[in-house]
Each structure stands twice: as structure tokens, then as C-alpha cells.
Image (cartoon, rainbow, N blue to C red):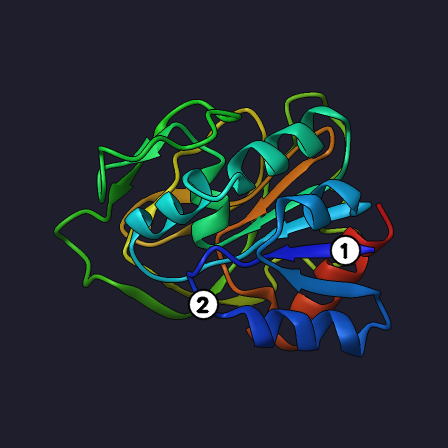
Amino acid sequence: MIAIVDYGAGNLNSVKKAFDYLGAEVVVTTQPEAVAAADKIVLPGVGHFSALGGLDNTGLRDAVLQGARAGKPLLGICLGMQWLFEGSDEAPQFAGAGIFAGRCRPFPSSVKSPHVGWNSLVVREASAGESSRLLRDVAPDSFVYYTHSFQAPIVAATTAASEYGAQFSAVVEQRNIFGVQFHPEKSWTVGLLILKNFCEV
């Protein structure tokens, strides 16, 4: 069973519908107990980084992190991926999970922000030299759909990047922790394949 964490940041129904389409057993929940009971955890989200504060005062933050430490597959989507880093300049007072080093920064002034629309994935080799599990069978340079104003840095766990003013992390993977900056639920067949790969981890 996959728990989709509802901390008030929206975009949950389209994520649930994508998993429903794939035949996965999913539940959207605000309850830490349901997160603790799940086999996999999905942390979606759109909007301002401060929305992630909704994790802190509900017990959801601890439930998600305990599940991750226990080895449960965790997928952060858009804002949820940014939370996997140390934090964001968008709301410096809110701490991220710190699973990946670095902070999310605004795009350079040379490009329009937010970054909205389709952009291609540049696949990178993970630091351990292992092939990406999320991107299994995804064609090189596939296009995915973005809408975000802040970007995560390139780190050792980055398995795909996109370029908008400069390269930023599009996909991160480290053991049981996964993150995608784009919206797989809005990225047609490529996005569904990525979610299917997560279901099969």
C-alpha cells in the first residue's frame, strides 16, 4: 500500500489518479499512523516551501522520516523533492529533511521564473555507478512537465537533470529515497512509466 501524504499543499487528486490508473493500492492521508502502516510513501506538493510546515505540527514529518529510515521507498514530487534537501531560500525558516546536501535556490535572473512547461531530461550516472531505477526504460532526452520557481542543486544522487538557465536536479535517487522535480502525473506516458517504476521498487 502506498500512502500519499496530505499536509495541505494540494495536487493530491491527480497524483492519486495516476497511481489508480496503474492499479496501485493507494490512500491519501493526513494521519501519521497511516503513513507508518504503508509499504511506500509519496510526498507530493505544489506552491510555497512554507507549506511544508504542515508536516511539522501534525506528526507527519516524523512518520515520513521514520519510514525512510526503516527502508521504505519514499518518493518526493516537486515541493516534496525539495523537502528532501536541507531547505530552500524561498522560506529559510523551514528546515528540509536534510537527506541530500544543499539548498534550493531561485533561477538565475537570465531566465523567466517560474519555470513552467515541458523540458527534457539529461540522464546522469549515479555516484555508485548504478543505473536509475526510476528511469528504467525511459528513453533518453524524454520530456516531462515542470512548474516551479526554485531549483534543487546537482548532487551525487542526481540521476537526471534539466537545464533552465543552468542545470538543476530533475531526479534524485539514493537507496530507498527518490525525488522528482517535475510532475510525473502530468507528464503523460513518461510520467506514468516513472510512477510504475516506483511501484515496482
Q: Relative to 30, is 129 on the left or the right? A: right
> Between residues 122 and 89, which one lies in front from this camera angle?
89
Q: Residues within 10 Å of mark 2 (few under 14, many from 20)?
A: some
Residue found 62% across the figure and 69% down from its top:
15
Q: Earlier in the sequence, mark 1 or mark 2?
A: 1
**Would you say residue 18 is visible in this rendering?**
yes
- Residue receiving disc 2: 10
Q: Amino acid at mark 2?
A: Gly
Residue found 19% across the figure and 58% down from its top:
111
Q: Position of residue 128 (x, y in %)?
A: 71, 21
Q: Residues within 10 Å of mark 1 (few under 14, many from 20)?
A: many
> Between residues 1 and 192, which one lies in front from this camera angle?
1
Residue found 64% across the figure and 41% down from its top:
178
Label at residue 2: 1
Image quadrant containing the C terminus: top right
Question: Residue reaching furthest left?
Answer: 109
Label at residue 99: none
Quadrant in the rendering for residue 147? bottom left
**Residue 14 vertical position relative to residue 80 in the rendered view, above or below:** below
Helix, strand or loop at mark 2: loop
Image quadrant containing the N terminus: bottom right
Helix, strand or loop at mark 1: strand
**Residue 28 vertical position relative to residue 117 in the rendered view, above or below:** above
